[in-house]
Image: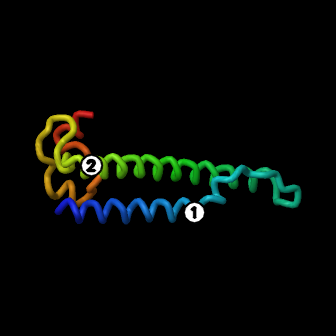
Amino acid sequence: MTEDEARLRLLARKDELEAEDRTNADARDPVTLQQDSVGRLSRMDAMQQQAMAQATQRRREAERRRIGVALERLDEGEWGWCTTCGEAIAEARLQHDPSVAQCVGCAGKN
């Protein structure tokens, strides 16, 4: 994978994450008590759905940070090299996820 291809994939994924954020924004809003609702179980279900939406949002934020760091490594000419040992990251690993920062060996040690 070339650096240009990696940059395009990273930017496209970043756009996807931002679109998902906009689509799911209301699911993370505080759960309000609705007197006309079925009752406690409905509220518990709504709170569980809210918690899952918030956890998904945190995962998207973490992925966005990884993408940002990968884009910085591209700008600096360091993309494709392990941030721990300095060896080249396997092409297949970069194809799978261009935001990875470590080779398989170093990632397995963490």
Position of the C terminus, as image quadrant, is top left
Residue tagged by mark 2?
100
Q: Image height check: is 103 above or below 38? A: above
User: 32 or 68: which is nearer to us?
Assistant: 68
The amino acid on which the numbered mark 2 sits, given as a three-letter code, is Val
Quadrant of the rendering where the N terminus is positioned:
bottom left
Locate residue 24: give its quadrant.
bottom right
Q: x, y (%) of residue 84? A: 20, 35
SS category of the residue bearing label 2: loop
The furthest residue to the left: 87
**Residue for point 82% across, 59% down:** 38
Q: Residue at x 17, y 62 (%)?
A: 2
Q: Is residue 7 left or right of residue 57?
A: left
Question: How many angstroms separate mark 1 from mark 2 (CA)?
Answer: 25 Å
Whether residue 11 is situated above or below residue 110 in the rendered picture? below
Which residue lies at the image location 36% right of the left edge and 62% below the top edge? 11
* Horizontal side, residue 68 vs residue 96: left or right: right
- SS at badge 1: helix
Q: Which residue, given by chain and number where applicable, does mark 1 sit on?
A: 22
Residue that extends furthest to the right in the rendered view of this protein? 35
Q: Amino acid at mark 1?
A: Arg
Q: Which quadrant of the view contains residue 49? A: bottom right
